[in-house]
Image (tube, coloured by chain):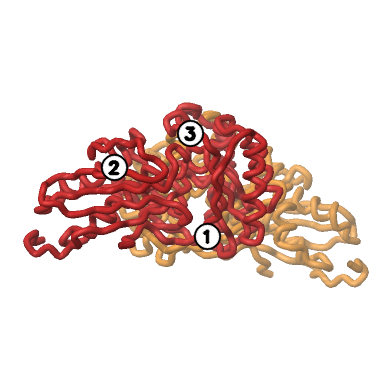
Chain colours: A red, B orange
């Protein structure tokens, strides 16, 4: 690399999609990007070295402006420390993903930041290198290194990640004719709280059911078998423990399933609830889920997202 | 059905392959057929109604001759009770699979019996119907209904089964250029003993590792990704508890892995150990595994089997 050539851009804006962590059957190993919402980060070269955050706008504004305490900032610091470019980077963050919604907001900010910063570098980094830098960023928010939101937000689609230090990332094909419905009730559920409620052990019989469901879901996706996906997209380990944290969850799930959803569960640590729904039923299922949350006293945002394998990308 | 037409054969012999239950990462949900060994059952029409077993030959001869206490006999009784043909069925069983070897011997006898009996019926039953009849048979031997040996022996190949009452059966593609090495030490391990040693609970962190490995293994098989298969074919839940039941297991596994195996674990409830090995290394890996068992004081049989999706079939 020759820093004096400056092949990279002067500034770049990147979009990174929200993501559904776990996808019901793959706790900490599966994630799904959703194009309908996401975060935008603009990176600009500065003569002053280091990383600065100049503005945070959008759905969340009370995030730290100190770069090393901010997921986007920390991810770009990780790049700068490794690549040592002869310039600094200034970031502006436009949050589209609500805080504590279970939609991978901190991951999306970190991913958008590394993708935007990468466009400034004289030589582009690999996707896997960007993944690792974004993981450093997300560690600021979650307190530990998780990759099940980072990987789908960066790579796009339904993504399996195996391992943490040198993660294997695999995109899983998704069935055509299916939408992902997302309903976000207006309450905040901290990931740490949702982790704390989980029992440290799982019964062996539940492990067998969950692994059968995970295997059935993956096999159904690889062979476009909607019946098998519908019979398998069912979390018997995590959802039964976390459902109590989300008022009205049982009614919301019932509305989704009785409306024709293939499966319905908690997005990441919640409180957002997602459902996979055949395209024709998706608007009706969304309305039923929203009505059920309303009946439980919660206002909602709702989105219908196509299942597409589009990850984060530079938009300007 | 018109029983008086007698479209079925007078007699038929069927072969059903042995199978590797669990396949390391899919406890009770994955199974793999192995063509190298199996059981043969001959079914003959008799004017006397009901089911009789006239002979049991081969590797195991001290099995019950009373039809309703024998896995093959009980499976065929299940067919007769449902189909009520105007003839009886006489069975001879030729065992190729050693007793208590962890190679699905009772499943193979039940499967060979239903496939042979099916050839005698005026109207053939579906594969799924045969699966259920064979499950009735295997319940005699194992004391509970399991399908993870029945399904691969009947359908062939690497088979996922989800659910018990109405099992979903899915054949998973397997990578070319890989052999399954099987080494059976001369000791008997009863499935019930091997079940009893398992703790009723699993730590959540082990669940995450195992599900990541299962998902990685399946995704690797669907996309022919040998590197991912090699990194994923690792059982962190069952094998660590059962390895103490098999003298020399650690050395046998070490011999397999250091010889180039993609993965090595216990076949079903053991004591047979299996390994997936690139074709070129398979003979050397087999020899290393046998030598390690010998060093632990155990004589062995060993087989190298191609990975093929051939299930049970009528051979005469």
Q: Residues within 10 Å of mark 1 (few under 14, many from 20)?
A: some
Q: Nearer the viewer, residue A246 or B29?
A: A246
Q: Do we see residue B288 in this rendering? A: no
- Residue B3 is drawn in which quadrant? bottom right
For the point 32% across and 43% down, the residue is: A56
For the point 77% across and 54% down, the residue is: B76
Q: CA distance from mark 3 to mark 1?
A: 25 Å
Q: Quick one: label 1 or label 2, which is nearer the N terminus?
A: 2
Q: Residues within 10 Å of mark 3 (few under 14, many from 20)?
A: some
Residue, disc 1: A306
Q: Nearer the viewer, residue B190 or B151?
A: B151
In the rendered structure, the answer to whether residue A165 lies left or right of residue B29 reads left
**Tag 3's secondary structure?**
loop
Look at discs 2 and 3 and give the one toward the viewer: 3
Residue, disc 3: A188
For the point 66% across and 68% down, the residue is: B315
**Tag 2's secondary structure?**
helix
Q: Nearer the viewer, residue A286 or A204?
A: A286
Residue, disc 2: A137
Q: Residues within 10 Å of mark 2 (few under 14, many from 20)?
A: many
Q: CA distance from mark 2 to mark 3?
A: 21 Å
Q: Is residue A14 above or below residue A51?
A: below
**Residue A298 point in image, percent of width and height:** 59, 36
Q: Quick one: label 2 or label 3, which is nearer the N terminus?
A: 2
**Residue A221 point in image, percent of width and height:** 54, 59
Q: CA distance from mark 1 to mark 2?
A: 28 Å
Q: Quick one: label 3 or label 1, which is nearer the N terminus?
A: 3
């Amino acid at each position: 690399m020759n820093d004096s050539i400056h092949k990279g851009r002067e500034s770049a804006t990147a979009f990174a999609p929200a993501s559904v962590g776990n996808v019901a059957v793959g706790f900490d190993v599966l994630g799904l990007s959703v194009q309908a919402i996401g975060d935008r980060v603009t990176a600009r070269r500065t003569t002053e070295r280091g990383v600065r955050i100049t503005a945070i706008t959008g759905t969340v504004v009370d995030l730290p402006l100190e770069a090393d305490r901010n997921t986007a900032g920390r991810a770009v610091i990780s790049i700068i420390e490794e690549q040592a470019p002869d310039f600094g980077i200034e970031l502006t963050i436009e949050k589209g993903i609500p805080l504590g919604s279970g939609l991978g907001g901190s991951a999306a900010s970190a991913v958008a930041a590394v993708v935007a910063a990468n466009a400034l570098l004289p030589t582009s980094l690999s996707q896997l290198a960007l993944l690792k830098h974004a993981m450093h960023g997300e560690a600021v928010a979650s307190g530990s290194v998780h990759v099940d939101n980072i990987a789908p937000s960066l790579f796009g689609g339904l993504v399996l990640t195996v391992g943490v230090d040198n993660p294997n990332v695999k995109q899983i094909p998704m069935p055509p004719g299916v939408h992902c419905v997302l309903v976000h009730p207006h309450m905040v559920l901290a990931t740490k709280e949702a982790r704390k409620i989980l029992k440290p052990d799982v019964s062996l019989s539940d492990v067998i059911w969950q692994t059968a469901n995970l295997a059935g879901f993956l096999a159904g996706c690889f062979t476009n078998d909607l019946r098998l996906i519908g019979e398998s997209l069912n979390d018997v380990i995590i959802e039964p423990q976390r459902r109590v944290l989300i008022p009205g969850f049982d009614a919301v799930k019932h509305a989704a399933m009785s409306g024709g959803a293939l499966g319905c569960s908690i997005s990441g640590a919640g409180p957002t609830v997602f459902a996979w729904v055949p395209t024709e039923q998706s608007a009706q299922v969304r309305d039923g889920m929203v009505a059920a949350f309303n009946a439980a006293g919660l206002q909602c945002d709702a989105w219908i997202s196509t299942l597409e394998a589009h990850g984060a990308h530079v938009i300007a």
